[in-house]
Amino acid sequence: MQISVRVAAATDLAVLQELFLASRRQTYTWMAGDTFHLADLEQQTRGETMLVAEDARGAIAGFVSIWDADHFIHHLYVDRGRHRMG
């Protein structure tokens, strides 16, 4: 599978919000699912550089957000259907 990485665009926001929300609800099972909201992505990544990984069809497979000041990867999420695919 070919994946390319690019800077996230404003048009990616809805897909990234859904990925972020679904991933957190699936992973943080000790927390109530209604604790998480679509708006959390914008709040938690404000001021960060966001890159998206997309497949050859242009579908978003995941994303990373980086706090540039400290060269710190703050968030890294991969669509659950893309896990273990290399």
Image: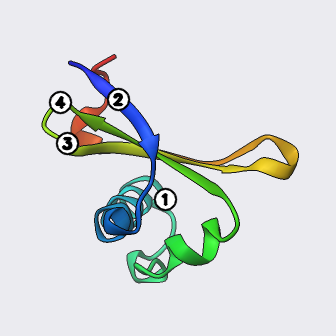
Residue 22 in which image quadrant: bottom left
Q: Which of these two is toward me, 44 or 36?
A: 44
Residue furthest left in the image: 57
| Spatial separation of the CA atoms under disc 2 and disc 3 | 9 Å
Q: Residue at x 29, y 63 (%)?
A: 15
Picture layout, residue 14 above or below residue 22: below
Q: Is there CB contact under 8 Å for labels 3 and 4?
A: yes
**Is the residue marked by circle 3 packed among few (<14), some (14-19), or many (20+) residues within 10 Å?**
few
| Spatial separation of the CA atoms under disc 4 and disc 1 | 30 Å
Per the rendering, the mark at residue 28 is: 1
Q: Is there CB contact under 8 Å for labels 4 and 2?
A: yes
Q: Is there CB contact under 8 Å for labels 2 and 3?
A: no
Mark 4 and mark 1 lie on one chain; the one further toward the N terminus is: 1
| Spatial separation of the CA atoms under disc 1 and disc 3 | 28 Å
Q: Quadrant of the N terminus?
A: top left
Q: Amino acid at mark 2?
A: Ser
**Is the residue marked by circle 4 packed among few (<14), some (14-19), or many (20+) residues within 10 Å?**
few
